[in-house]
Amino acid sequence: MPVLHSAPKFASNEGVIDALSAALGSMLVSAREEHGEVVLTVARDQVENALRLLRDNHEYQQLMEMAGVDYPSRAERFEVVYMLLSVTKNHRLMVKVNAAENTPVPTVTTIWPNAGWLEREVFDMYGVIFAGNPDLRRILTDYGFEGHPFRKDFPLTGYQELRYSEEDKRVVYEPVKLAQDFRSFDFMSPWEGAEYVLPGDEKAEGDKA
């Protein structure tokens, strides 16, 4: 039977950090190991150059995923996270950049075409702008949607409701309309036991009598 050989692995993440830190030079802001993975933070305006170097010179061939993170208390409240995979080295890498609401992040669609959809998702959910993305539209919410749902300051309550209008074929905002029966709440969970007869329990109360 043929003997299967796994792809070569790095001896340690420490060796990876040293090698990539030297290669990235001034493009690198910080490098660390976190939860067993190497995390590199690079300068926002150099992210395209940094990721191209990691792909072409260090064999991180695939952009597996992108994600956004929101820290409202920071001056640059957003982090954009790129998750890279080296097939030949059997190693994963996380690259981060920081951004504010008015500081666009350079697109990496010039390196990985699949980044177009991933950047659209981060834009839709967080409002991060990707400069140079050829089709930066919403992808998960409707085009008429206002705001970005994953922001930690996104309003969850208010006096307007959102619904899809079959007549208009789009999302519309309307004043909240509540039936009178639903205007009073006591927030008591029936699983914890209410101190009054719940609808449907009349028969049980009669048995106790």
Image (cartoon, rainbow, N blue to C red):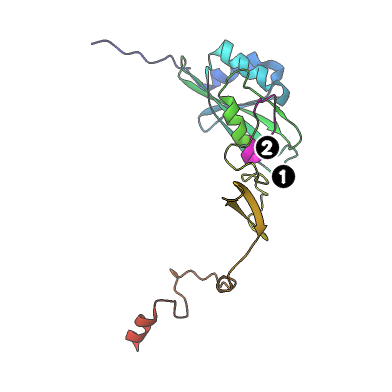
Residue at 58% in and 70% down: 179
Which x, y percent locates residue 13? 52, 22
Which x, y percent locates residue 112? 57, 20
Task: Single out the mark in the foreground, 2 or 1.
Answer: 2
Left or right for 200, reference 72: left
In the image, what residue type sits under mark 2? Phe
Image quarter of the N terminus: top left
Q: Which residue is mark 1?
A: 73
Name the foreground residue: 87 vs 123.
Answer: 123
Q: Which residue is mark 2?
A: 78
Name the foreground residue: 123 vs 31.
Answer: 123
Find numbered disc 1 in the image and state the secondary structure of the residue it sits on. loop
Left or right for 30, reference 66: right
Name the foreground residue: 145 vs 12.
Answer: 145
Residue 32 in which image quadrant: top right
In the image, what residue type sits under mark 1? Ser
The reply to whether discs 2 and 1 touch (Cβ–Cβ < 8 Å) is no
- Where is 159 relative to 186, above or below? above
Question: Which range of residues does the magenta coloring cover?
Answer: 123-135
- Where is 134 relative to 75, above or below? above
